[in-house]
Image (cartoon, grey):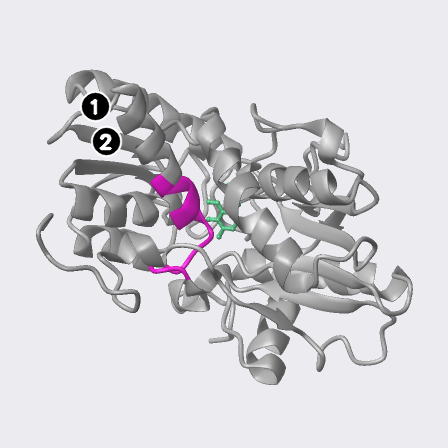
């Protein structure tokens, strides 16, 4: 492959198509609000989610350190999106991927991983667990199995919850892109809101934005009833916002760049996701809906002429078997 000519309009692989996603104004949903909601279209990444960026950066940093060698095995705990990003990067780079996930995650997620050639290991939910709802308890079981598999298969684990490459990907790419696309002017972006899973997206983007304008309010979005960052007791660990809200402050959390929190209910997230599809033509998932619900609330308080930025975390196609868009 090294001898093939390069051309400015031809990507050498889909890895070059990760990032550089568009920023769209939600001028129909936000009509009449003083602030303008700007949505970063992370669903437009090759794997359909914000996690492609983190997956690629984790692998590339590991290659550089020598932790991951040609033909190696990657093992990761994933609700699907990180796994899909890893599966794409592993397919191109020639690594074997073992994706460990809860049975509570939607079936589309497993099927997509298998389609990219990953080996999917499903971990049964804790007693009383509900399909489509992955609790902290379920996640602890997946964690246990992941650790075993790393040993059994002599694998390298990106460990997205603890790996600094995760937030670094968003600090180096997603955040600066949002800043440049929104107009790169001090004061233009009034606030940034994003839901927290590993915290990589929120922390990375917030660091990049605050480095450029310390006045930008960076607000962490949490599922109502699973709000550890807000310091509240966990009353609803079984919320529907898959991929986020695990009921604990993530290990790589950075409270320095967090100015506050907003809680969003399942119903609000679903309502926003449906409105996004029907009025803005954007099909995103539960967490994208939650982010937009939070951003619309912030935009109501924003000074006129400023922007509130947020993230369409993944594609809504991943949730067609759920109640996100109705039966
Ligand atoms: C659908 C979805 N939304 C949001 C997130 C949260 O992103 P982060 O892990 O960067 O906090 C994830 C993470 O996997 C996800 O899968």
Q: Secondary structure at mark 1?
A: loop
Picture layout, residue 318 above or below residue 154: below
Q: Badges 2 and 1: C-beta atoms under 8 Å apart?
A: yes
Q: Secondary structure at mark 2?
A: strand
Residue occupied by mark 1 = 155
Q: Is residue 118 visible in the rendered structure shown here? A: no
**Precedes in sequence: disc 2 or disc 1:** 2
**Residue 179 falls left or right of residue 262:** left
Instruction: Give the extent of the magenta segment.
Output: 45-56
Residue for point 85% across, 69% down: 305
Q: Nearer the viewer, residue 327 or 324?
A: 324
The percent coordinates of residue 59 (x first, y second) are: 31, 34
Residue 23, located in which quarter of the rendered image?
bottom right
Picture layout, residue 38 above or below residue 233: below
> Ligand 1 within 8 A of label 2's CB?
no
Residue occupied by mark 2 = 74
**Residue 189 falls left or right of residue 314:** right
The percent coordinates of residue 279 (x first, y second) are: 62, 83
3D distance between C-alphas at marks 2 and 1:
5 Å
Q: Is residue 46 visible in the rendered structure shown here? A: yes
Badge 1 local density, few (<14 within 10 Å), some, or many (20+)?
some
């Amino acid at each position: 492959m090294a001898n093939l000519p390069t051309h400015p309009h031809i990507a050498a692989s889909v890895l070059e198509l990760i990032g550089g996603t568009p920023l769209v104004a939600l001028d129909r949903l936000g009509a009449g609000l003083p602030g303008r909601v700007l949505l970063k279209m992370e669903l437009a990444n090759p794997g359909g989610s914000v996690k492609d960026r983190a997956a690629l950066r984790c692998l590339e940093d590991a290659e550089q350190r020598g932790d991951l060698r040609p033909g190696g095995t990657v093992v990761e705990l994933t609700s699907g999106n990180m796994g899909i990003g890893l599966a794409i990067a592993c397919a191109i780079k020639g690594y074997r991927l073992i994706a460990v996930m809860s049975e509570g995650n939607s079936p589309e997620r497993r099927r997509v991983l298998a389609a990219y050639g990953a080996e999917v290991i499903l971990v049964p939910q804790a007693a009383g667990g509900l399909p489509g709802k992955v609790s902290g308890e379920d996640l602890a079981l997946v964690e246990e199995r992941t650790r075993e598999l790393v040993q059994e298969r002599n694998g390298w684990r990106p460990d997205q919850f603890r790996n600094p490459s995760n937030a670094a990907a968003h600090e180096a790419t997603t955040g600066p892109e949002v800043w440049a696309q929104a107009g790169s002017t001090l004061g233009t972006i009034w606030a940034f809101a994003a839901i927290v899973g590993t915290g990589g997206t929120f922390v990375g983007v917030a660091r990049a934005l605050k480095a450029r304008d310390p006045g930008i309010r960076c607000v962490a979005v949490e599922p109502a009833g699973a709000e550890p960052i807000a310091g509240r007791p966990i009353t609803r660990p079984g919320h529907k916002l898959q991929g986020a809200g695990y009921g604990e402050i993530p290990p790589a959390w950075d409270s320095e760049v967090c100015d506050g929190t907003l809680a969003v209910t399942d119903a609000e997230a679903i309502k926003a996701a449906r409105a996004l599809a029907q009025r803005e033509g954007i099909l995103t998932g539960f967490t994208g809906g939650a982010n937009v619900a939070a951003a619309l609330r912030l935009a109501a308080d924003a000074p006129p002429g400023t922007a509130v930025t947020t993230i369409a975390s993944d594609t809504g196609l991943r949730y067609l078997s759920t109640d996100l868009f109705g039966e």
